[in-house]
Amino acid sequence: MSNYHIKHLEEYYQVYRKSVRNPEVFWEEIAEEHFLWRKKWDNVLSWDFTKPEVKWFEGAQLNITENCIDRHLYTRGDKTAIIFEPNDPNEKAEHITYTQLHERVCKFANVLKDKGIKKGDRVCIYLPMIPELAIAVLACARIGAIHSVVFAGFSSTALATRINDSECKMVLTSDGSYRGAKTIDLKGIVDEALKECDCVESVLVAKRINSDIDMKEGRDHWLQPLLDNASESCKPEIMNAEDPLFILYTSGSTGKPKGMVHSTAGYMVYTAYTFKNVFQYREQDIYWCTADIGWITGHSYIVYGPLCNGATTVMFEGVPSYPDFGRFWEIVEKHKINQFYTAPTAIRALAKEGVGHLEKHDLSSLKVLGTVGEPINEEAWHWYDDNVGKKKAPIVDTWWQTETGGIMITPIAFATPTKPTYATLPFIGIQPALMDESGNEIKGNQVDGRLCIKFPWPSMARTIWGNHQRYKDTYFSAYENKYFTGDGALRDEVGYYRITGRVDDVIIVSGHNLGTAPIEDAINEHPAVAESAIVGFPHDIKGNALYGYVTLKETGEGRNQDNLRNEINQLITEQIGPIAKLDKIQFTEGLPKTRSGKIMRRILRKIASKDISNLGDTSTLLNPEVVQSIIDNAF
Ligand code: 6R9
C-alpha cells in the first residue's frame, strides 16, 4: 500500500523524501493503486523546463469522470456526492447522490453531443453556483470537451475576451443568478458578450430565477427539456493522459488574460491526493469549500479532488453576508461540516462583525479549517483559530496558484504543527527553491527570496492556450530550469515557508526591500483596523515612500484620525522598524478587490502616484464604486 493518507510529521518526512528521491516510482504507486485506468502509462514522466514541456503518465488512457463518479457507484451509490445549499436559507438544500450525479452528468453529456460538441471542442461555462455548474463541468469531461469556466460575476467584455481567446463553440448559462438580496441578469450579459463572438453556435440556458429573457431563435435553447429527453447512459470518451481537461483564465500583470491549460491524468492524480491528505478527509466527512467553481480552488477542491475521493462536497450559492453575517456558521451547523475551506478576505470580513454570530451556532463538527488565496495576517489567523476552530481544528494555510492546479505548500492537517501566517512545508513531491536577484538558489534556513519550483509535479499547467511562448516567458524564463511563481517567500529556522506576497508587491524604500504583507500585518493588529493595503509612491529622497489605505472597523469610525495615524505608525515602528512607517494614511470605506477577493494594488498604486488618468479595466472588480471614493479622498 502506498502512503495515501499521511498521519504524522515523521511519516510526512518519510514520504516526502521518497517522493523527491524517486518521483517516478512514488507517483506511479499512487496512480496505480488509487485510480481507474483504461490503459496504464508507458512512461511516468518526461520533462524539459527549457521548452517547457512536461508529460505525466504518457500513454495512459482514462476518463476522469469514471474516477469521480462511476467507480463509486457500487460502494457509494447512495452516498451524497454534492450538497447544494441555495442562496435563500428558506429554500431546501439539495442532496445529490453518486447514482443521481451519474445520471445527471450522462444526460447532460448526451445533450452536449446532440448539439454537436465533440472531443477537443471548447465549451464556455458561465453559470452561478447551482448544481448544473458542477454537472456541466463533468459532462464536458465525460465527452472530452474542454471546459472553460468563466466566473459568473465577470462582465460581458471579460466574458467575450475569454470566449474568443479559446474559440468556444457553446456557452452554458442560466436565465439569471441570485447573489444575496440581488438577482443578476446572466443571460443578458451573455447576449451582450456574444455580439462580439462569432465562434459560438449554441447557448444552453438553465432556469434559475424564472425571469423573462430573450431567447435567440436557432442559437438559444432551454436546458431542461433537452435533459428530460436525453438518455441516462453515456459512455465516457477515452482520453489520453495529456489531453487537455480544461482551460481556466487567470489575469496577467498586464492586458490579456492567460488561459491556463490543465491536462487530464496528472491533474486528477495530484488534486485527489492533495485533497485527501491536506484536509485528512475521511469517508463520512462533509467537506465545504466556499470558493466559486469559477476559480481554480473550486475546480480542484469542490469538484475534481473531492469527487475523486468519493467525498461529500458542499456547493453554496450565496454570500457570507446574506441574510446576515451568520450564514456561514448556520450552514456549518446545518450540514455538520467537518472541513471548512475559505479565504482570508472572508475571514477578515466575518471577524469585523464580531463573535456574536458565531455564538449562536454549534460549530463542534469542525475538524479542519483551511485558507487560500492570499497571505493570511496574524490577527485573522488567530481569530479563525480561537473563534471558529476553538483552538482544536488545525488551520491548513494552503499556498498554490491557478497555474499549479493543486495545493503546493501547506500543512497536512494533524500531521504538520501549524504556525500563524506560515504555509509551512512543501507538499509531497514539491521541490521549492528560493532564489536571489542574480539567479542563484539561496540554500539553508532563515532566508528569503523569490519562490520557484525546481521539479515538475503532476498537476502543473502545460501551456497557455494558443500562446506557448507567453507560458515560457512568464514562468520559465526568469530562472533557468525553474518554474517561477511570482511570489516571494521566506524559510524559517525549521524550514517552514511563509509566503510574503507577490514579488511585484515589494517596495524598495531608501534601498530597503519591504514586503507589503508584514507591514499590513502590523497595521491590522490595531484594534480599530479592519483591513489595509500598502503601496509605494515616488519620493524625492527615499525613491519610494509608503502609502497606506486603511479600512476601519465600526469601533474605529468615530475616532480622531490623526491619533489613529500615529498609533498605526507606532505599531509599524514596533514590529518592523521606523523605515516602514507610512508617509500617507488614507482611511477608506473599502479596498478595490478582484472577484476572488484579492486587493487590486495596481489601482491603489496609481492613485497614490496621482496617476488617475488611466486606471485600466476596473469592470472586473467586485466593488468598482469604491475606486471613485478613494480618488475623491486621496491626498
Ligand atoms: C489558489 C489561488 C495565486 C496567488 C499566489 C499567491 C496568492 C494563494 C496563498 C497565497 C499566501 C496562501 N496565494 N494562496 N498567498 N498564502 N495560502 O488562489 O490561485 O487565484 O491563481 O492566485 O494567490 O500570491 O501566487 P490564484
Image: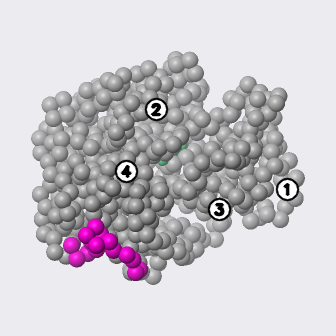
Front residue of 234/321: it is 234
Q: Are marks 3 and 4 in contact (CB under 8 Å)?
A: no
Q: Is residue 68 above or below residue 90?
A: above
Label 2: few (<14), some (14–19) or many (≥20) C-alpha neighbours in 10 Å? some
Going from N to C along the chain, the mark reached first, 3 or 4, is 4
Label 1: few (<14), some (14–19) or many (≥20) C-alpha neighbours in 10 Å? some
The residue wearing badge 3 is: 625
Q: Which quadrant of the figure contains the N terminus?
A: top left
Which of the two marks, 2 or 1, is nearer to us in this view? 2
Is 595 on the left or on the right of 511, as rendered? left
Residues under labels 3 and 4: Cα distance?
A: 28 Å
Going from N to C along the chain, the mark reached first, 3 or 2, is 2
Query: Looking at the rendered structure, which numbered label has been put on residue 474?
Result: 2
The residue wearing badge 4 is: 164
Going from N to C along the chain, the mark reached first, 4 or 2, is 4
Which of the two marks, 1 or 4, is nearer to us in this view? 4
Tell me the amino acid under the disc marked 3: Glu
Which SS class for mark 3? helix
Which SS class for mark 2? helix
Q: Are marks 1 and 4 in contact (CB under 8 Å)?
A: no
Q: Are marks 1 and 3 in contact (CB under 8 Å)?
A: no
Front residue of 467/440: it is 467
Q: Is mark 2 within 8 Å of ligand 1?
A: no
Q: Are marks 4 and 2 in contact (CB under 8 Å)?
A: no
The spot of residue 604 in percent (x, y) is 68, 47
Tell me the amino acid under the disc marked 2: Thr
Magenta stretch contains residue 503 = no
Residue bounds of the magenta highlight: 211-226
Examine the image and state in which quarter residue 475 appears. top left
